[in-house]
Amino acid sequence: MSHYKIEAGTAQHAGSRPQQNDRVALFTAAQAPGYVLAVLADGNHNAVAPDQVLLTSKHLFDEFRASDSSSLPRLQQLLRDIAQEAHHVIKMNPIAASAEPHSALALLVLTPQAQAVWAHVGDARIYRFSGEACTMRTNDAEYIAHLVEHDKLPLEAAKKHRGARLLNNALGNSMKDPFVSFGTHEGLQAGDALMLCSDGLWQWFRPEELAAAVARNTPRQAAERLIAKAGERAQGKGDNCSMAIIKLLAPGARAARAV
């Protein structure tokens, strides 16, 4: 069993957009005590797809049954199922024919065995921090390699996938099924932290800046400071800004004081 307690929170800001189309949530599992699921869905011009992501995530996580020893492949399959089912339901929505709702996606499961399993689609990001150091961050490299190897695209064309509807990696894309990237980490310990965030946040910060903000503050305080700084750096051109922050603290430890 793990030797830490969890301190977590979510936060959102519309940025300079007229409405908030991101969705973010933390869920516990009805049939898997000690498991936590963090979900972040970054919508395009409406919230139809992100809303469906949250509904599908909660439904499938509530159906998940834990065994005595966690299976990382089972958890990866759970995250794959969430992405694929949400994608298909979004495409069946009557509004999809005209509004084309899309969503980037970040999913993270923490287990009582001190494991983390994550998956992402598109430009939502997941970070793992150890103290004030960034030890992992997701990116598009695996998807770009997939486009080059599987779709036989030239590397430079693959790197421009966000600008092509046919190649855009997102839930709800009627022209291409989402490519889901996975990762795992075992041996989580006190002092570690994880963050899910939309591009309205991560594009304005170096990874070490995010790590320091999370390490030195509570999740709520870190979110407030990061949202304020993102707005300052965006200079009136900021996108929706959303995040989920999970800190692992030693039992009995006090929350970090803001600095």
Image (spheres, helix red, strand yellow):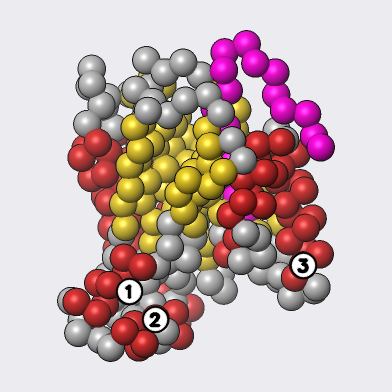
The residue lying furthest to the top in this view is 252
- The residue that label 1 is drawn on is 144
Quadrant location of the C terminus? top right
**Looking at the rendering, which quadrant does residue 141 occupy?**
bottom left
Q: Residue at x 26, y 50 (%)?
A: 81
Q: Nearer the viewer, residue 258 or 10?
A: 258
Q: Amino acid at mark 3?
A: Arg
Give yes or no for residue 245 being in the magenta stretch.
yes
Q: Residue at x 80, y 74 (%)?
A: 236
Badge 1 amino acid: Ile
User: Quadrant location of the N terminus?
Assistant: top left
x, y percent for residue 92:
33, 67
Give, as a single range, the part of the protein colored magenta: 242-259
| Residue 40 x, y percent position in the rendering | 50, 52
Dot 2: few (<14), some (14–19), or many (≥20) neighbours within 10 Å? Answer: some
Residue at x 20% of width, y 84% of height? 152
Sequence-first tag of 1 and 3: 1
Image marks 2 and 3: residues in contact by CB distance under 8 Å: no
Can residue 97 be seen?
no
User: Mark 2 and 1 residues: CB-CB less than 8 Å, in contact?
Assistant: yes
- Residue receiving disc 3: 233
For marks 1 and 3, give the CA distance: 28 Å
